[in-house]
Amino acid sequence: MEPTVFAQIMDFLPLVEFRKCVARYRGHHKVKSFSCLDQFLCLAFAQLTYRESLRDIEACLRSRPTKLYQMGFRSRVSRNTLAHANETRDWRIYADFAKILIATARELYAQDPFGLELEETVYALDSTTIDLCLSLFPWAAFRKTKAAIKLHTLLDLRGSIPTFIKITDGKIHDVRILDELIPEPSCFYIMDRGYLDFSRLHVFHQNHAFFVIRAKSNLQSRRLSSRTVEKSTGLRSDQTIALTGVQTADLYPDRLRRVRFYDEETRRFLVFLTNNFLLPALTIAQLYKCRWLVELFFRWIKQHLRIKAFFGTSENAVKIQIWVAMATYALVAIIKKRLDLKPSLYTILQVFSVSAFAQLPINQLFTESEGKENDDMSSNQLLLFNL
């Protein structure tokens, strides 16, 4: 008899690596039943099937008791046991495992196009805020009357795979995340002006990494030279500059390139700063436009993964749920590539959500739905995930 679809999905998990993550943080210390794998399977099931609560997870899984063992569960599913595991087990187990899946997904999507013909790796850095109830999540105090956490993400634009994730409270300023990154030589980092800090950007320059970032209106600089531009493309100027601010001149003593561009869609002038002097000016502007992919990523995971309503209120439980969501996202991306599934990631998740207990090969689930995307999806989402 064919395994359930959920069991087939979980067959793609590198369980040897998962056990290493569990052992690293002593995840099974004093645990007699309901292993870390059982916990992961419960939470991954919740992500794939859009469960709303612990009671919802328990009821759904207990409705098919004869199939649970074959699906990988080795313990009785109980909401109290799952809640206790979410509160007490180290969230780093699931963070490390998610990073392993992300690394695998990156290798599979390394040659995928993202809109520009560049051999170098291109990253987009941004953050999204997830609002919480202050009375339930006091550890995430953001303002006087609300709580929030921030999900800081560095997105590899080839395949829209998150390569760096940092979960902080809402008070942490975005620019501080630059200190957490290890710049990769010859790679491009695209950022909004919230990350404009010249001392930190100079670290990227010293590590031979390239950045493209929007300039602020009060930038103090001196033009050193200019290059001709084709104004019909939207370009207005392409200059080499030196910073002249009292502090910025010392914080970034090297030259910078300033590209001014008129965006027809928004009818705004945009000014970009970069330390790359080789790419055409229009490519610099197009690179920054690709930053929109990280915003689409945030919108997509908020709509289709369970990272806005949480199964526990502690910091540990919240981090576990987010990291399992990222692991599930990477796992489905891996399956899409390895099985050469044509539908978008959105369509694949929709089919999985209603077929978890079905006993059919995964490929057969998409034989009739291939190429039939949901017409209600926005064109931006289709562009991002129709890989």
Image (cartoon, grey):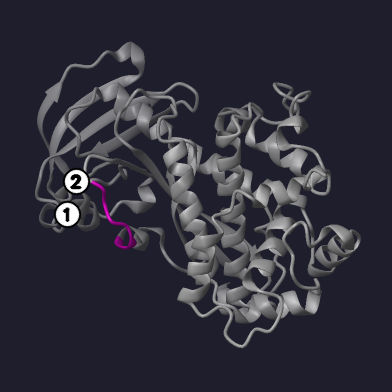
Quadrant position of the N terminus in the picture: top right
**In the picture provided, is 230 more to the left or to the right than 250?**
right
Provide residue 117's location: percent of width, then percent of height. 35, 23
Q: Position of residue 44 (x, y in %)?
A: 68, 57
Residue stretch in magenta: 179-184
Circles 2 and 1: CB distance less than 8 Å? yes
Who comes first in sequence, dot 2 or dot 1? 2
Q: Is residue 67 visible?
A: yes
Q: Is residue 331 left or right of residue 75?
A: left
Kindly identify the amino acid type of the residue bearing the numbered disc 1.
Answer: Thr
Element carrying mark 1: helix
Q: Is residue 168 left or right of residue 218?
A: right
Label 2: element kind:
loop
Disc 2 from disc 1: Cα separation: 8 Å
According to the picture, the residue beneath numbered tag 2 turns out to be: 220
Where is 200 relative to 119, above or below?
A: below
Quadrant of the frame with the C terminus: top right
Position in image of residue 125 (x %, y %): 41, 48
**What amino acid is at disc 2?**
Gln
- Is residue 309 something one can see in this rendering? no
Q: Tag on residue 85?
A: none
Identify residue for label 1: 248
Residue at 35% in and 52% down = 195
Q: Residue furthest front?
A: 1
**Closest to the observer, 301 or 251:** 301
In this picture, is 76 found above or below 3?
Answer: below
What residue sits 51% from the left and 80% below the top? 26
For mark 1, does the 10 Å Cα neighbourhood hold few (<14), some (14 to 19), or many (20 or more) residues? some
Q: What residue is shown at x 72% (from left), y 60% (from top)?
A: 72
